[in-house]
Image (cartoon, helix red, strand yellow):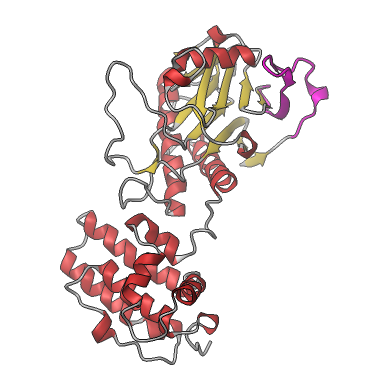
Amino acid sequence: MVARSRKVTAKDDQSEPVDKHTEEKGVLLFETTGKEKVYRFKDSILLSLPEGRNTLTTSWLNGGYREDLRTIFNHMVPKSKHAPKDLDGGSIPAYLAIIAKSLGADPDTSSGLLTAANMDNVSIVTKSFRGVEVTAVMTAGIEINGGRVGDPASYYQEDGSHQFIQGTINTMLVIGANLPPYAMTRAVVTASEAKTAALQQLMAPSRYSTGIATGSGTDMIAVVADSTSPLLLTDAGQHSKLGELIGKVVIECTLKALEMQSDLTPLSQRDILVRLERFGIEENNYWKVASHMNGDNRKAAFFKKLREMSKNPVLVGATGSILHIVDEISWGLVPETAGRKVAVSIMKGLPEMLDIDVSIPFDELTDEKDTIIDNWIRVTGWLAKNCDPKDICNSRK
C-alpha cells in the first residue's frame, strides 16, 4: 500500500475555475492520478471531474446517483445565515446552484456540500494498492453539534423546513476504479464507519447526550468512481482491499481535519476535565464538592491545581476506565451494582497507581450506593485540594 500526496502548481493546469463573485482563481491543491483536481477558494473547495465519472452524493443539488457531474464542491456557509430563507436564492438547492455558477461551474452538472468549517482546514489523504487509488478530501468540525446516532432530535421537519446547525464532517471520496452503483453505496457505508471509528479513537463527546459521538447531525458525503477505468471493483466492504483503503484514508483524513478545525487530537483529549465534559462535569462541579472539604478554600488556587492535575496520564487512564464502566452500565453490558463496586475498587487503587505518600480518606469520599461519577469527583477533588500536582501528590517516582 502506498500513500501519496502530490503537490501541483498552476503550470499543471491552464484553466483554473474562477469565483465570478470575486474573480478569485482557484488554487490547485492536489491532483489524482486519474486527473481529478482539487481547487481551493476562499469559501469553497472544488473537485473538478474528468468525463466518465459516476457520482453518489447526499447533496440537495443533483444529489443521489449521477453519471453526468463534472464538479463537486464543499462550501462554507456564512455564519450570519441561520435558515434556508436567509440564503441567496431563498432555498438550499437554489443557493448551491448560485455557488456553483460563482465558481465557474455549470449548476446542471454540479453538486455541492455545505459546512461551517473553514476551508483553510481542508485535509487531503490518498493511498493506493496495485493501481487502485483512493483519495479523501475532508473538512470536519464537531465542537458544536457532534452527536451520537439516536440522540434526541433538534427539530421535526415539516413542509420542507430545515434548520442550520453549525458543525459538519464533509467527505469527498475519489476512487480510481469502476464501481457499479451498489458498490458505491457500500463505499458510503464503509466511509461512514471509518469516520465514526476516528471519533471513537478520540473519544469525541456528543453534545446532545452522555454518549460518544458517531458524527455530526449534518454530515455529508460525495463518492466518485471512474467508469472509464479497466479496474472493475464490486466490493467496497471491510473484507475487500478497496474497503481497507477507504477505511484508512477516511480515518486519517478525519483525524487531520478535526485537528486543524477543532484542535481535537489525542493530546487534547488527555485531560480528565475534557473526558468528563460529556457528562456535564466542569470545574464548578468540582469546586462545589471540594469547597466543603478540609483545606484551603481559595477557588482560583484550587482551579489552578485541578487543571494541572487533570493532565496527569495516570489519572487520565483511570478516568477512562471509570467512564468506560459508566458506558457499559448504560449499554447493559455490566450490572450497575457490580459496575459501581469495580469503579470504587479502581479509585482505592489510586495511591499505588500514583505511587503517592498520602492517605486518602476513601471511607469518607466513596460510597458504592452513590453514582460512579459522584464518587470520582469527590476522590479526585480531594487530590486536587490536598496534593501538590507538580510532584503528583508527593510522588516517589
> On screen, 101 above or below 318?
above
Image side of residue 16 versus residue 377, left or right = right
> On screen, 60 above or below 199?
above
Q: Could one spot residue 31 in this view of the protein?
A: yes
Asked which quadrant contains residue 75, the reply is: top right
Q: Looking at the picture, how far across and down is residue 149, in whole percent? A: 32, 40
Q: Is residue 395 magenta?
A: no
Q: Could one spot residue 252 in this view of the protein?
A: no
- Magenta stretch bounds: 7-35
* Residue 90 vs residue 379, the one in the foreground: 90
* Residue 230 vs residue 276, the one in the foreground: 276
* Residue 386 vs residue 106, the one in the foreground: 386
Q: Residue at x 22, y 70 (%)?
A: 340
> On screen, 203 above or below 375?
above
> On screen, 82 above or below 14?
below
Asked which quadrant contains residue 69, the reply is: top right
Q: Quadrant of the N terminus?
A: top right
Q: Is residue 26 magenta?
A: yes
Q: Looking at the picture, how far across and down is residue 353, in whole percent? A: 42, 81
Q: Residue at x 73, y 27 (%)?
A: 27
Q: Looking at the picture, how far across and down is residue 254, in whole percent? A: 52, 42
Count how many numbered circles sit on residues in the image.
0
Q: Looking at the picture, how far across and down is residue 247, in whole percent? A: 49, 40
Which residue is farthest right? 11
Q: Residue at x 40, y 21 (%)?
A: 182
Asked which quadrant contains residue 139, the reply is: top right
Image side of residue 1 versus residue 320, left or right = right
Which residue is farthest front? 298
